[in-house]
Amino acid sequence: MVCVNGINYEVIKEFRDGWNEEEFTSRYSEILHKYDYIVGDWGYNQLRLRGFFEDNSDKANYETKFSSVPEYLLEFCNFGCPYFIVKKVKASEPKKESRKSLDKKEMNKAEKGS
């Protein structure tokens, strides 16, 4: 997992050693914040980044839907080029202790205090 500008991403696919965290973070731009997925492809030793939305997103059109990534790779990338796909990971909330475990802790405290 990598964090860029406060947003966490997880590499979900890598082809031909395409993932390079240092290059990804240096090429990353704020315009990519809005996308659910980012595809990075290499051509002529340069990393290119392109964003895609979940297929069911209201923001997505045909070309920006995640299901169109294979077509993008075939039509717009050098044949067989190294690439990677990262997915935005939402920060999870801290775990809350269940009421049952809290009751046990309180009971243990009470027993020790008596």
Image (spheres, rainbow, N blue to C red):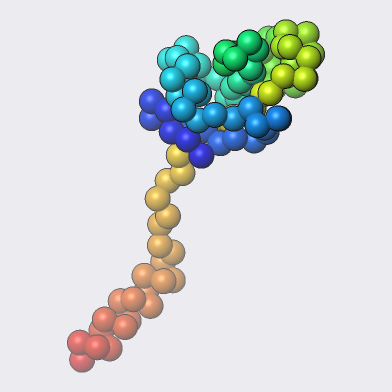
Q: Quadrant of the C terminus?
A: bottom left
Residue found 72% across the figure and 8% down from its top: 76
Q: Give the side of residue 21 with respect to residue 76, left or right.
A: left
Name of the residue lying farthest toward the left: 113
Q: Position of residue 12 (x, y in %)?
A: 64, 35
Name of the residue lying farthest toward the front: 45
Q: Is residue 57 above or below residue 105?
A: above
Residue found 45% across the figure and 14% down from its top: 29
Q: Give the side of residue 38 with respect to residue 74, left or right.
A: left
The answer to whether one can see residue 68 in this image is no
Q: Nearer the viewer, residue 80 or 36?
A: 80
Q: Nearer the viewer, residue 45 or 30?
A: 45
- Disc tally is 0
The quadrant where residue 91 appears: top left
Q: Give the side of residue 103 with respect to residue 14, left or right.
A: left
Q: Give the side of residue 61 with respect to residue 94, left or right.
A: right
Q: Is residue 4 above or below residue 30?
A: below
The quadrant where residue 101 appears: bottom left
Q: Is residue 22 above or below residue 64?
A: below
Residue found 78% across the figure and 14% down from its top: 79
Residue found 44% across the figure and 71% down from its top: 100
Q: Is residue 102 above or below residue 23?
A: below
Q: Nearer the viewer, residue 10 or 63?
A: 10
The answer to whether one can see residue 43 in this image is yes
Q: Nearer the viewer, residue 68 or 22?
A: 22
Q: Position of residue 40 (x, y in %)?
A: 61, 20
Q: Position of residue 3 (x, y in %)?
A: 43, 33
Name of the residue lying farthest toward the bottom: 114
